[in-house]
Image: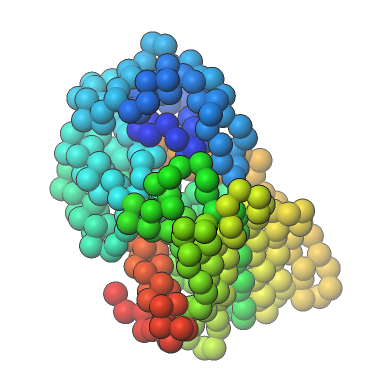
Amino acid sequence: MRIAVAGLGFMGMVHLKAIRNLTHHTLTAVVSDDISKLEGDLTGIAGNLGGPGEKMDFSGIGRYQDVADCLKDPNVDAVDLCLPTDLHEEMAIAALRAGKHVLVEKPMALDGAACDRMIAEAKTQGRTLMVAQVLRFFPAYVGLREALPKLGAVRSALFRRRCAGPAWAKWIADKSKSGGGVFDLVIHDADQCVQLFGLPEYVSATGYEDLARGVDVMESQLYYGGGFTATITGGWHHPKSYPFSMEYTVVCDGGTVDYSSLGREASLFRADGESELLQVSSVDGYQAEIEYFLECAEDGVRPEMCKPEDSAASVRLSRLLEESRAKNGEKVKCQF
């Protein structure tokens, strides 16, 4: 498959680094309104993971300042949209109508209705649509997903994700364009809960939002049947200096699965007192994600490991959490 990357900011650079490690798929175009980036100078890009910016060789591939021009390129089979969130719906639908398969960065869109329109267009055009919910492909989280069916009933789950307020792109601090810290960070773990446990019956959330100061924090509870509650906590903790981290602890009848990016490898602590490291892949999650999308597109099959309907549910769930936070933790029924 021949893929174009639209948007050469932080996430676009992360995706480009992953694509160059693919052996059966080819980068054939890039899109940016920044001429220096189209010439391969990504040295000024920074983010909270993926390493520093660097120079890349874009000679011999299509280079476009406008997505519409890229969509006319016959050498592009699929488009990887790494653009501001408020552009996702418009650009994804345009790409689908141009006959391209679409991978769109998370969050899928800013509201559920926009997600539904994207899904409907993909079905109409007969093209593959997938949202880059990369946590579904991160080795430590794949290990959790594979371990849970062997451990019996889940009794408690905690997911935590924190970083500094992003300072590498002005649009991210504009909630109308990005959705803020909830849609930047919390939605990752909301999607994990959708994947692992389904939709909860109720949600509640508390926290604080001051995007002008780079703060958007939340502690939320997802209430499932039988008394099981999943906790999602984290967000933006002031700009620049606060380190990125992600972690989980899931307690089951058969043991506890635990992981932290700050030095605790994904491990299973069994109910019988024994412990072991989870067997996890060494393949980078971004590489695995993009390769899986391209294979689905090439084979003409639905991305069952990362269905767009799940991504739409995660958007709706994140909106419900914001609604509860605005009501000082009032329980909100999860009914879509």
Seen at 61% across and 48% down, the residue is: 240
Circle count? 0
Viewer-proximal residue, 35 or 312? 35
Q: Splitting the image into 4 quarters, where does residue 126 fall?
A: top left
Taking the view exactly as shown, the residue that stands out farthest to the front is 212
- Relative image position of residue 207 (x, y in whole percent): 52, 74
- Relative image position of residue 75 (x, y in whole percent): 28, 20
Taking the view exactly as shown, the residue that stands out farthest to the right is 273
Q: Is residue 1 visible?
A: no
The image shows residue 11, relative to residue 64, as above or below, that is below
Q: Classify the position of the N terminus by image quarter.
A: top left
Seen at 20% across and 55% down, the residue is: 117
Q: Is residue 14 left or right of residue 300?
A: right
- Relative image position of residue 36 (x, y in whole percent): 42, 20
Q: Splitting the image into 4 quarters, where does residue 294 fall?
A: top left
The image shows residue 140, relative to residue 21, as above or below, that is below
The image shows residue 152, relative to residue 176, as above or below, that is below
